[in-house]
Amino acid sequence: MPSIDRRLFLRAGLAGAGGALLTACSRAGESTAFVQPTGAEVRAAEAARRPGPVREFGLIAQEGRADLGGPVVRTWMYGDRLPGEPIRVRAGEVVRARLTNRLPQETTVHWHGLALRNDADGVPDVTQPPVPAGGELVYEFTAAHPGTYWFHPHHGPQLDRGLYAPLIVEDPDEPLGYDEEWVVVLDDWLDGVSGTPDEVLAELVSMANMDHGGMSMDHTLDNGATAPDGDQGGGHGGHGDMAMPTPSPSASASSKWPHMMMNAESDLLGGDAGDVYYPHFLVNGRVAAAPETRTARPGSRLRIRLINAGGDTAFRVAIGGHAMTVTHTDGYPVVPVETDALLIGMGERYDVLVTLKDGVFPLVALAEGKRAVARALVRTSAGARAPEADARPAELDGRLVSYDALVPTDAVRLPGKTPDRTITLALTGSMAKYDWAINGRKYDPKVIEPVRSGERVRLSFVNRSLMWHPMHLHGHTFALGTSGVRKDTAIVLPGATVHVDFDADNPGIWMIHCHNVYHAEAGMMSLLGYRAGKGEPK
């Protein structure tokens, strides 16, 4: 079949999937007509982005062998590298990416953080049918906003394999001055070492309600408490510019449940740091014992784009001997602020500028609460000796910038407006039952929170569990808390309530979910849908 015919054929299948969701139930139970992912309003929103030149890319999702810098694993990747080959375009250009699925199961691609057309969002059976094994699909969308983004599957726990890569949208009017750029992707790794992500999910679900040998696993609050110290603004806003806590005894796997994490504790994350034991933590696909080395000139100004592609791990990141100046988070610019370290939840991104000294320095990503590190090196002197693999930069225990300290630049600040609609999303569930959910209901694609185009919408994340959750909204960027910093993914601590506002300006049906892949797959996902307009075709 010629490529253009194949693309049109698959678009027709996609329209069918969207049509099936046109009428669904809101949480209150009433029948509501929603904009189709391929509907007229979606097409109009895409045209308003004034699509520019088309850039073509090929993505082959396949099984292969990845060298992690010593350990060699069999995993799933885009192409033959880990992370996958970055996609880099200029703002306003059109991405036309042909996905060829050579995996043994169906898959999709989600373009994380982009405000793109709804039918390219990659949510199976919501914005598209999944791409079957042996199938192809062309994703086509305008990359309208500059920034640091990434892409990954949105099908089961596939994200926790090697299926991820950066997506960089360059600003044609780049205001920052820097000499070089380095994209740094952080990850936690178990695939092909201790099992597969599917086995991990099955283990976490199967141990629910079983005899846990006296382990305390009840991670649920009886009601929605507000954040400690009255913090309503951001997930880790109460920890800015504070020294880090002393780690508790070493984290390890459970003897009974080999994929379950024991003693993973972090004050920064409100207690329990994570569910899953990972044997390795990676920077750009390399273990700490065999780090990637970035070479540069002393005195040069390096822009680092940090992406957390992990499944269950927040990373605390620092560069030995250097402060970092934060310039962007989740793709959007902030008033520059200096920090020693960053806490990065799954799905979050930060851009920083660093003026490099003379020598060789470790970039260390501490697996928060898990007492292990991912590591890379920055070398500006050929003769300098690299620090030992277990070196811990003092900066990890220095200043840690909070959400409240991140202020959006005037160009991206969301104008002040009273919300037209508030949607409360209670984050519920426990480790004991592994019943992660939103508003006490596991994900049901027939239940959609309605909004209307043009509204200012407030999402109130009320964490009623005793675990932290990095909450991600598809297709939009929201203003977070009191500072108004623009983000698409935000940490919500146990017991905290976090308010985020966004303008409903991108019609379609969009997912909201925890970016802990195992929490999401257990049920902590929900949908938000734009009510169909008067002229929307049925």
Image (cartoon, grey):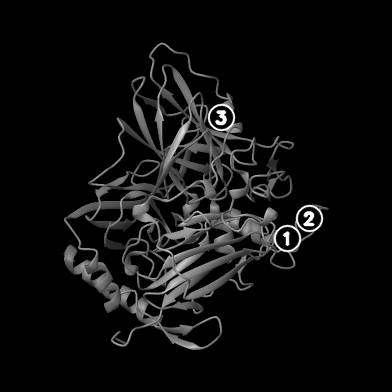
Q: According to the image, label 1 marks what residue?
A: 432
**Which residue sits at x=34%, y=49%?**
147
**Which residue sits at x=56%, y=29%?**
395
Dot placed on the residue nearer the N-terminal end, 3 or 1 = 3
Label 2 Cα crowd, 10 Å radius (few <14 / some 14-19 / many 20+): few
Q: Are marks 2 and 3 in contact (CB under 8 Å)?
A: no
Quadrant hosting residue 415:
bottom left
Amino acid bearing label 2: His
Q: According to the image, label 2 marks what residue?
A: 212
Q: Is residue 6 above or below residue 387?
A: below
* Percent position of residue 94, x then y: 22, 57
* Percent position of residue 313, x then y: 57, 46
Q: Are marks 1 and 2 in contact (CB under 8 Å)?
A: yes
Q: Residue furthest right?
A: 214
Please state if 470 lies on the left or on the right of 76 as rendered. right
Label 3 Cα crowd, 10 Å radius (few <14 / some 14-19 / many 20+): many
Kindly state the secondary structure of the residue where label 2 is placed: loop
Q: According to the image, label 3 marks what residue?
A: 395
Please state if 414 lies on the left or on the right of 537 as rendered. right
* Percent position of residue 133, x then y: 37, 61
